[in-house]
Image (tube, helix red, strand yellow):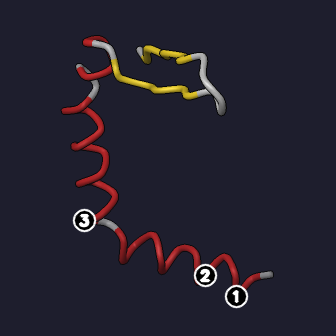
Amino acid sequence: MIDRHVTPQVPVRVDYELTDLGRSLHPVLVTMKDWAESRMGEVLAARARYDAQR
């Protein structure tokens, strides 16, 4: 899912790039991000309740 390219120089250079398989996850990750952002109020409230119990 990630290609790693090493260029032998000083200092060594390492580049990373998503493969086609990795890029195919983009729609899934965008959906997860949107879900999390739309529920941030609930997440923060749950965190506050948890912290208050400690």
Residue 41 in picture, x, y percent from top left: 36, 77
Which numbered mark, 2 or 3, is in the foreground of this view? 3
Of mark 2 and mark 3, the one earlier in the sequence is: 3
Task: Find the distance from the CA under tag 2 to the CA under tag 3.
Answer: 19 Å
Distance between the Cα atoms at labels 1 and 3?
Answer: 24 Å
Could you say whether the residue bearing mark 2 is in a helix, strand or loop?
helix
> Looking at the rendering, in which quadrant would you find the N terminus?
top left
**Left/right of residue 49 with respect to residue 21 in the rendered view:** right
What is the x, y in percent for residue 34?
Answer: 23, 54
The residue pinned by badge 2 equals 49
- Side of 17 relative to 9 (left or right): left
Q: Give the Cα distance between marks 1 and 2.
A: 5 Å
Residue, disc 3: 38
The amino acid at mark 1 is: Ala
Per the image, the residue denoted by label 1 is 52
- Residue 9: which quarter of the image? top right
Mark 3 Cα-neighbour bin, 10 Å: few <14, some 14–19, many ≥20: few
Q: Amino acid at mark 3?
A: Ser
